[in-house]
Amino acid sequence: MDTAQIQPIESIGYNVYLNDSLNELVNFVEQGNYSKFFILTDEFTTVHCLPLIEEKLTGKTYDLIEISAGEECKTIDFCIGVWKMLIDFGADRRSLLINVGGGVVTDLGGFAASTFKRGIDFVNVPTTVLSQVDASVGGKTGIDMDSIKNIIGTFTQPKAVFIEQAFLKTLPSREILSGLAEMLKHGLIADAAYWEALKNSDLSIPSTELIAQSVVIKNRIVISDPTEKSHRKALNFGHTVGHAVETWSLDHDEKEHLTHGEAIAIGMICEAWLSVKKNTGLTESELNDTVKVLTRLYPKYEIKDSTFPALIELMKKDKKNEGNTINCTLLKAIGTYSINAICTEDELSESLKYYAAL
Amino acid sequence: MDTAQIQPIESIGYNVYLNDSLNELVNFVEQGNYSKFFILTDEFTTVHCLPLIEEKLTGKTYDLIEISAGEECKTIDFCIGVWKMLIDFGADRRSLLINVGGGVVTDLGGFAASTFKRGIDFVNVPTTVLSQVDASVGGKTGIDMDSIKNIIGTFTQPKAVFIEQAFLKTLPSREILSGLAEMLKHGLIADAAYWEALKNSDLSIPSTELIAQSVVIKNRIVISDPTEKSHRKALNFGHTVGHAVETWSLDHDEKEHLTHGEAIAIGMICEAWLSVKKNTGLTESELNDTVKVLTRLYPKYEIKDSTFPALIELMKKDKKNEGNTINCTLLKAIGTYSINAICTEDELSESLKYYAAL
Ligand SMILES: NC(=O)c1ccc[n+]([C@@H]2O[C@H](COP(=O)([O-])OP(=O)(O)OC[C@H]3O[C@@H](n4cnc5c(N)ncnc54)[C@H](O)[C@@H]3O)[C@@H](O)[C@H]2O)c1
Ligand SMILES: NC(=O)c1ccc[n+]([C@@H]2O[C@H](COP(=O)([O-])OP(=O)(O)OC[C@H]3O[C@@H](n4cnc5c(N)ncnc54)[C@H](O)[C@@H]3O)[C@@H](O)[C@H]2O)c1
Ligand SMILES: [Zn+2]
Ligand SMILES: [Zn+2]
């Protein structure tokens, strides 16, 4: 498919551009009547992504604000750093902040902008698969505190999002795979044809078209439930078990811990198994298909029986649970979900056992 | 007037209660289906104001968060302290924060709540005249940084405001006078009858009725222009010159500096003089009336000729100016304003000279 046919996707009051996006960015900046503009990067996107943007911005002056890379920088300290740079550079109410980076930069930059002078405009140029297909729509900004993710933040929509697939060329393959898990999730919960397309594609660098389809799915779900009351829970598929495994890995794996996507892939296998177990409608053969695709893409991770209780405890603590039950989003079939499935601790343990035995 | 007749004032999606307000607060908490609630105070409102509230809240458990008092505490450090206490006390999305204090507590608490878990509910119990008549409506939250006031913040409406005049009994008279300047301003810009009522009242502790009328005026202006494009500039009367004098005093008066209201009173005299000078319609006798009332209430402050240039510079830097002109809100008559009056440096100097010679 010719990417020129990919139209901007309309989200909540703004467009997500996927075709000729960096020129669209330049148009946006030129037409925006801004007094000044600022670019926020992290140490790696300064090197890998900023040059492509600078090429387009010839002759335009802006100030650069750079933070260090990584989740451990998504903190109030770095946010204060951004605010102070905006002050020092003389940002006013009609200034624009352009966030160029992965989810860390777009989440932190979005929060900094949404609170500077009670809110200045910002746009996102997501440069990882995860930020392109997931963080690009939904309007969540945020920072972490006391190792609680996104505990401080706002719901503020960017003025536009510019997705340029070319950025993915420099992204480490493990980071690509991490974002890919969300794309696969979008197929599993909402679109069987998309799932098939993903299965049959070269996923070493996902195409613009595959990214676009993922954004369309996430956007449709977000728009149908902006305040996370019902439908949006669909996006939690794989995340009940996945988050627990991710947190456990962060706390216990000394050398290298799981990426978000690697953990979610494990979660999706367990939760697909739970779907069959609890007769939601997902068939054995759909389960096998899911498992086959996910185990082909993601390395096997060892989970010992002895860690099951700790994992269950983590699931119980998860903010998405109300009271003492563990709530999962399951699959009715590939391409259809069912929210608020209450799972017992035994069932969840069994699902971990299923994964461990693969 | 019987205060029982004072109906709640409807602001942008919430009520301001002025009659039997602490019982209204209890009703609100009981009916709100909140999982937990928290009270934010400063060191003085814990002593002077919290007991009156506790009396009403018998049997209800809550956690108290206290900050130190004063503008120098309206910072990100104290805000982080509030966020961490909320985390430690286990606040969730259905928690309520009750801000009990002056504008520092309501501004900082509003900001902390509007960003905690992307926004939890908060209500304000303003306990100073300034916070009751000014900060109670408008939805501005904020903190200071690098000595720039309110540079970080959000526009977030509280879920309700509870004004209890009884709190003012313990408020130092200089603080009462500070808030009174905004009440007088409301009369001058919007309601001649209210100005007359203020002139003829005992203002040592303003009555609930006078406070209510002030809230009604500010609310009407805010609702007519929520995003500060036009009408809301009416509220800047006295503030172009006043802010400059306030900042100068903060930077230069070693022992005791002007309060906000004392500075605004000076500003209102200068800007009333400018109104006559620039033929906006205000008469000499209205100017004299204004000056008589303000000089009776507020101590004379010495402004030397040699400081005029520094004051003019401060006015030019004021965020409300666009470009190099100095924009003032003037009076057409007592009770009517006129925005966007462009004043020259000479005119502003002359107005300062007028004040200095009184
Ligand atoms: N707001 C939302 O709705 C939402 C949704 C999902 C995830 N998130 C957040 O996103 C964050 C994770 O995002 P992420 O995975 O993009 O992490 P990230 O921003 O840390 O990026 C991962 C790494 O890739 C590097 N990088 C980025 N682009 C690159 C490129 N083109 N070439 C080479 N290196 C590049 C970064 O410097 C970083 O080291 C988490 O904090 C998560 O909470 C937010
Ligand atoms: N959000 C808005 O729209 C808005 C409007 C105007 C002013 N403000 C902000 O309000 C702040 C000033 O408010 P303020 O004048 O109330 O200052 P404040 O909160 O510092 O209170 C003044 C002093 O009075 C004490 N106090 C409060 N209530 C008391 C009581 N009942 N008895 C005894 N002592 C009491 C406080 O502890 C403090 O020491 C500024 O930061 C200003 O920016 C905000
Ligand atoms: Zn995820
Ligand atoms: Zn004021």
Image (tube, coloured by chain):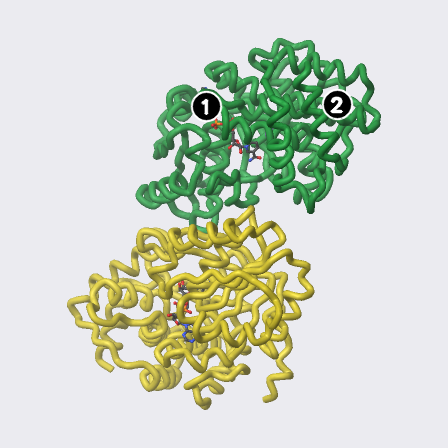
Chain colours: A yellow, B green
To which residue does mark 2 refer?
B273
Packing grade of label 2 (10 A; few <14, some 14-19, many >=20) is many
To which residue does mark 1 refer?
B254
Choose between B341 and A16: the one closer to the eye: B341
As shown in the figure, which amino acid type bears the numbered disc 1? Glu
Callout 1: residue from which chain? B
Packing grade of label 1 (10 A; few <14, some 14-19, many >=20) is few
- In the rendered structure, the answer to whether residue A345 lies left or right of residue A63 reads left
- In the rendered structure, the answer to whether residue B242 lies left or right of residue A288 reads right
Q: Residue A331 placed where, x, y %?
A: 42, 73
Callout 2: residue from which chain? B
Q: Residue A101 placed where, x, y %?
A: 46, 68
Question: In the image, is residue A95 above or below residue A204?
Answer: above
Earlier sequence position, callout 2 versus callout 1:
1
Question: In the image, is residue A42 above or below residue B277?
Answer: below
User: On residue A342, which mark appears?
Assistant: none
Question: In the image, is residue A168 above or below residue B339?
Answer: below
Q: Quadrant of the N terminus of chain A?
A: bottom right
Q: Residue at x 52, y 40 (%)?
A: B150
Choose between A256 and B150: the one closer to the eye: B150
Q: Residue A37 placed where, x, y %?
A: 58, 60
Choose between B6 and B202: the one closer to the eye: B202
